[in-house]
Image (spheres, coloured by chain):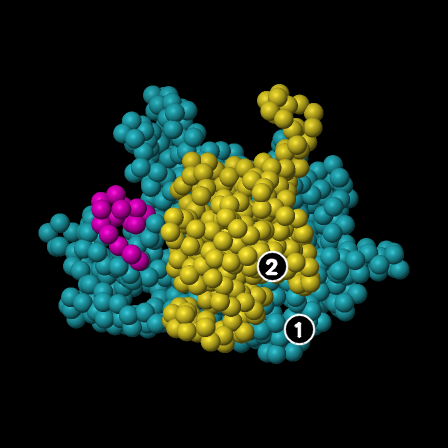
Chain colours: A yellow, B cyan
Amino acid sequence: MAVANIIQLKVEDIHISFGGVKALCGVSLEVKKGEIFSLIGPNGAGKTVCLNCINGLYRPQEGKIFFEGRDISSLRPYQRAKLGISRSFQKIELFKGMTVLDNIRLGRHIHLKTNLLEGALYVGRVARQEIEHREFIEREIIDLLEIEYIRDKVVGMLPYGLQKRVELARALALNPKLLILDEPMAGLNLEEVEDMARFIIDINEEDRWQVTCLLVEHDMGVVMDISHRVAVLNFGEKIADGTPPEVQNTPQVIKAYLGEVEDLYATRR
Amino acid sequence: MPREDELEYLKREIDRELTLPKLFLETATKYGDKKVAIREKEFGVWRPITWKDYYENVKYTALGLVSLGLERGDKVAMIGDNRPEGLWVEVAALCAGGIGVWLFQDSLIDEVSYIIDHSDAKFLVGEGQEEVDKALSIRDRCPKLRKVIWDDPKGLRNYDDPILIGLQEVMRRGREMDQRTPGLFDALIRMGKGDEVALLFYTSGTTALPKGALLSHYNMLTMGQNLMRVDPCFENDDFVSFLPFAWIGEQMMSVSCGLQAGFTINFPEEPETAQENIREIGPQVMFSPPRIYEQMVRTVQVKYLDASWIKRKMHEWAMAVGYRAADLKFAKKPIPLWLKVLESFAYVTVQKKLRDHLGLSHIRHTYTGGAAMGPDHFRFFHAIGVNLKQIYGQTEIAGISVLHRDGDIKFDTVGKPIPETEVQVTVEGEIISKSPSVFLGYYKMPEETAQSLRDGWLYSGDTGFIDNDGHLVVFDRSKDVMILSDNSKFSPQYLETRLKFSPFIRDVWVIGDKRPFVSSVICIDYNVVGKWAEDRNIPYTSYPELSQKPEVYGLVLEEIIKMNQGLPEVAKVRRYVNLYKEFDADDDELTRTRKIRRSFVEQRYKDIVEAIYSQKEMVHMDTTITYEDGREVKIKADLQVADVPLEVG
């Protein structure tokens, strides 16, 4: 998708510390609409903390977060989800005892306009809505992510790579404007990584979706291939920000990080 | 359901004017929007396509192809999974006077470019990005290729090569053409003659380069009619199309029989969901190569191993009853009343459910063909009351020529010739046949044509004989019969199919031709043996490692010992090796229809053969594996060569 020059997500000078540990000190980011934006950095750099601040799991002690121009710093996670911010987790957080389809439906829950009583009686618009949502899930998500053959399987029984895909499916069910992915490639084999990268690009570029993606990822091969821009965190501070080649050539990044990155890069190639 | 003698299509005389498109037009007009022609599972729901929709899709696709420059006799190559678009593009190509050429979905680039170039295909119709990528990478080698048509837009948004065009766009052009020249479609259909070439089939061939067999409309139509004279199909039947269209068996059912009988053709959602979708449909007719049935048996056996004690006992008892009744039926002996009572009890308690799970609840006839099937598999299906029949034929006779009749089934034969078909065995033992369905010849290969077509007889290259009941018995490809140490002849396939009845064994290659003893190379079934190993806390990480575990060798040994019982002394397997990978068509070890290519594997694994017959204990292997995208990977492995103990074997 063409990247528009509109700032969709703006993180302004956020600080957060846990006891004496300063997890983030003054991080600012700007994610443009239509972008694949990656956040990288060594372990413990504060990447996941940053994501948690954006979707509201953590409250930064200082600083503000704007989404589409609106200050969302004081909103609760579900309110941010309603605005169109959706995420997946580094460690899979699915309901293991439920089927793939039910897990995806849960992600759709936020769009249900009916109340408990109507739902219990299953009358009038409930049935219609149910069908609409089911159609959305089948046409837009299950078909896109090629998980037809597991739709009725219980999630806990699936291989790890497929569970990751189901998690992405659930995040998509929200019909997000901004999709936050925390290490979508972690623990996947080469083929699964290629598939996942393909799906992320599809979600970003396909006319139907055009979703902005914010990615935390350790697989540098993928990050450098698919990102429009990359920001580098180190010990809670942002040390670089720019296009993949720019970041790769920033002296601080090379010093703090790229030695290790190159190794990682090499293993994937 | 109408009675058999009321079926119009059986009474019809197929003359030299009738073509598949003419029949299509007739059938579509007859049913209109009152009957479902095709059903496809999409987005989780079965979506019906009536004959009217089917007709319109075919019409506009055909006219679209004409507007792109298709002329009579031009070849239209097609590749992709089984889906309605595939079927209607084929019918559309025929309606426009073109010739259909199907490629196997999993063909490697070189096969694709060979067939496209050799067939002079002007159009290639693919499914989506994968096929488009294949086409774009071979276009330089296939200068005659004019347009590449796709129907699934997924992943194709950045492709703007002018050779590409979407099926929707083709149909839009067709609609325009129809407005400009109404009546053109019908006129095109009327121009066809029965003797013209309809389809060009590239036979996978266990030996040399693929040969293109030319089949006329007349061949295809007579084939379907003669088959259904034995086993009629009805218009309310359901058939599930999940095997490659490039295989003649699938064409025979979906096109030759489908257009005549007018039954509904169902397409699964994805290849992975086929088994589930078959269960949902519950077809009345099925035709598959043995591997599908082998897989079904394996599923049952694996579930059995996993079931609770009471379920296992029930299954054992029901199978024992079923086997007993089946054996009496095979022997054409009456079934005593007490057994009938037990049989119906076994049906209600076990077999009914079993058949439902396999999708065989409504099955009336089910056929296997294309390769040999073991007697054990055969008995299994009859024991659960499924009317499985062997058929024999080849692409060159538009599908089949010989078939079992109901109530006259012998699992070591392939049955009797279908109507209008003569089958004989030459002095040398070669099976030859003559029928209206015998093909026109091989495309651009006059020598090969002269070799297989002599005085109207089709020379099959298979050996066999006709037994006292008039049944044809097929040995093997003539060169596949092995001569044992005592100079007796033996079929390696017999041993292979027997061993494959074990759920743990996926593929077998038996060696023994002019050797001091018989040996075998085993490919274990990764899933089943993997599960077995997990249950016993045997750690492994990969196929090569699992295959070499001593426990797994022990497991395979038990299966070999079981099979060796009852075999003549010279035919018993004495040594075996577990291979570090499964046989794969991409590595040329199997044909696309999963027949083993003996001469090739013999060459490829000559080190293993050498080790077996030089009494070595170990063999070191260093080979390459080809992935579907053409990448090659080297594999190194040490394989153990094990003996089968004499006293128990």
Tag of residue A103: none
Percent from the top left, x then y, of residue A69?
A: 67, 52
**Both marks 2 and 1 on one chain:** no
The mark total stands at: 2
The subunit letter for the residue under badge 2 reads: A
Q: Which residue is mark 2?
A: A31
Percent from the top left, x then y, of residue A51?
A: 50, 52
- Check the image and report above or below for B164 versus A154: below
What is the secondary structure assignment of the residue under circle 1?
loop
Q: Amino acid at mark 2?
A: Val
Q: Amino acid at mark 1?
A: Leu
Residue at the spot 66% in from the left edge and 73% down from the top edge: B145
Q: Nearer the viewer, residue B95 or B426?
A: B95
Q: Which residue is mark 1?
A: B145
Residue at the spot 38% in from the left edge and 48% down from the top edge: A19
What is the secondary structure assignment of the residue under circle 2?
strand
Crowd tier of the residue under label 2, counting other residues whose Cα lies within 10 Å: few below 14, some 14–19, many 20 or above:
many
Percent from the top left, x then y, of residue B580?
A: 29, 62
In magenta, the rendered stretch is: B528-542
- Viewer can see residue A237: yes
The part of the image, by quadrant, that contains residue A114 is top right
**Position of residue B575 in the picture relative to residue B605 (left or right):** left
**Position of residue B102 in the picture relative to residue B560 (left or right):** right
Residue B538 part of the magenta segment: yes
